[in-house]
Image: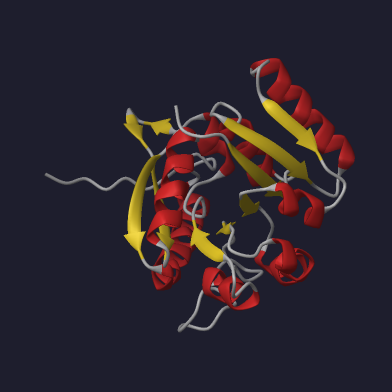
Amino acid sequence: MSAKQTIAVIGAAGNMGSSIARNLSKGNNRLLLFGNDKEKIATVLTDIRNSHASAEVEALECAADASWEADIIILAVPYQAEQEIAAKIKEVANQKIVISIANPLNDTYDGLVTAADTSAAEELQKLLPNSKVVKAFNTVFAADFVTPVIDGKQTDAFVAGDDAEAVNTVAGLVKTAGFNPIVAGDLKISRTLENMQLLLIQLTMKYNYNWLAGWKILHN
């Protein structure tokens, strides 16, 4: 069994954050949950404890406190909120893995608000220069955490980052969460991954996939 890791989920009251927390509670992890909606956080705590009686999980009142205790910090917040959160956790996130799940979508879902030569993950790395930013969980929907096997195939989830050890650690979390992890490359690949999710959202809206859809690489 792998060593127990303490994971802070910032934004654990949201659809993605709560889904990530529920699925990671199945692994050998200690989870620290932070979110602005205390009632929703309480519901997530209850759900996890009812499903996994042995799970180590607790709610904290402050993003910085949760991050200070954590080995890994998952920012399950919209792109627009990352700058504010990064400022709060910068000092306590030194040399830690910080996972960016954000997709910098515009209001009409027909493009990204980031420039072509950057990504949400790269912008977060600039804000947290002493942290190991890894892109993960951005190419899946919240519903996929409940049903990671779609049409008989396990959904792929892509991981990108500049620190190989950090990327491998995050790939392990992706696997614990129920997905097939694919290491896509360095952090710059986040530009492609964020555009992939933009496309998946557009296709989901066009063809009514009911928000249960994902990517699968087919190969020999």
Location of the C terminus (image quadrant): top left
Location of the N terminus (image quadrant): top left
In this view, the residue in front, 123 or 219, is 123
Residue at left offset 80%, top offset 29%: 43
- Residue 138 image point, x, y percent: 51, 55
Q: What is the total number of numbered labels drawn onto the structure image?
A: 0
- Looking at the picture, does residue 55 appear above or below residue 184? above
Describe residue 69's horizontal placement relative to residue 209 as left or right: right
- Looking at the picture, does residue 155 appear above or below residue 53? below
Residue at left offset 49%, top offset 54%: 136
Residue at left offset 73%, top offset 40%: 32
Residue at left offset 38%, top offset 39%: 155
- Residue 164 image point, x, y percent: 38, 59
Is residue 2 visible in the rendered image? The answer is yes
Coloring scheme used: secondary structure
- Looking at the picture, does residue 47 appear above or below residue 53? below
Is residue 11 visible in the rendered image? The answer is no
- Residue 187 image point, x, y percent: 43, 69
Describe residue 9's horizontal placement relative to residue 96 as left or right: right
- Residue 6 image point, x, y percent: 64, 41
- Looking at the picture, does residue 184 appear above or below residue 117? above
Residue furthest to the left? 220
